[in-house]
Amino acid sequence: MHTLAELNWLNNKVLDMRSKCIKYYDSMGGKNSKGINALRDYQQAEHKDKKESNLDLSDWTSQYPENIPQQMNASDC
């Protein structure tokens, strides 16, 4: 399982409980499926720890919104 520290740029991922969707916003236009999977693992572990039951994420989707502000380099964050 991945640790929360491995979820680089956590602030650009949104876990939407109502619509059962994880959204990944990348200002450089990338898609980070590894980060999405780590967030899924983390959410399942937190749910199990707090609710003492499994969280089924099989019907959840992942989205990568495209019409967001972009940056031209990796240092202007």
Image (tube, grey):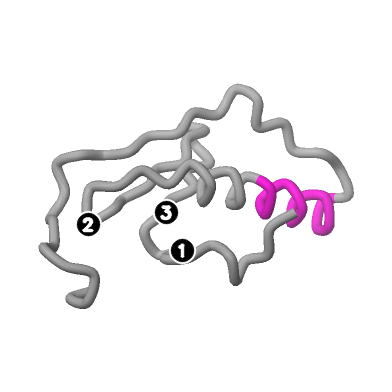
User: Mark 1 belongs to which amino acid?
Assistant: Leu
Which quadrant is the C terminus positioned in?
bottom left
Numbered badge on residue 27 = 2
- Determine crowd level at label 1: few under 14, some 14-19, many 20+ residues with C-alpha closer than 10 A: some
50 magenta-colored: yes
Above or below, 6 relative to 68 = below
Specify the label residue 10 is tagged with: 1
The amino acid pointed to by label 3 is Lys
- Which SS class for mark 3? strand
Packing grade of label 2 (10 A; few <14, some 14-19, many >=20) is some
Secondary structure, mark 2, is loop
The residue tagged with tag 1: helix, strand or loop? Answer: helix
Q: Which residue is drawn at 82% across and 39% down?
A: 54
Q: Where is residue 57 in the image (x, y as percent from the top left)?
A: 65, 32
The kind of residue tagged 2 is Ser
Mark 3 or mark 2: whose residue is earlier in sequence: 3
Q: Quadrant of the N terminus?
A: bottom right
**Mark 3 or 2: the one toward you:** 2
Left or right of residue 18, residue 5 in this image: right
Residue with the mark numbered 3: 13
Question: Magenta residues, as a range?
Answer: 41-51
- Residue at figure coordinates x 22%, y 77% from the top left: 75
Q: Compared to 36, does 21 lie above or below? A: above
Q: Gap in Å between the C-alphas at discs 2 and 1?
A: 13 Å
Q: In which quarter of the image is residue 4?
A: bottom right
Q: Residue at x 49, y 28 (%)?
A: 61
Q: Distance between the residues labelled 3 and 1?
A: 6 Å
In percent of width and height, residue 66 lies at 20, 39
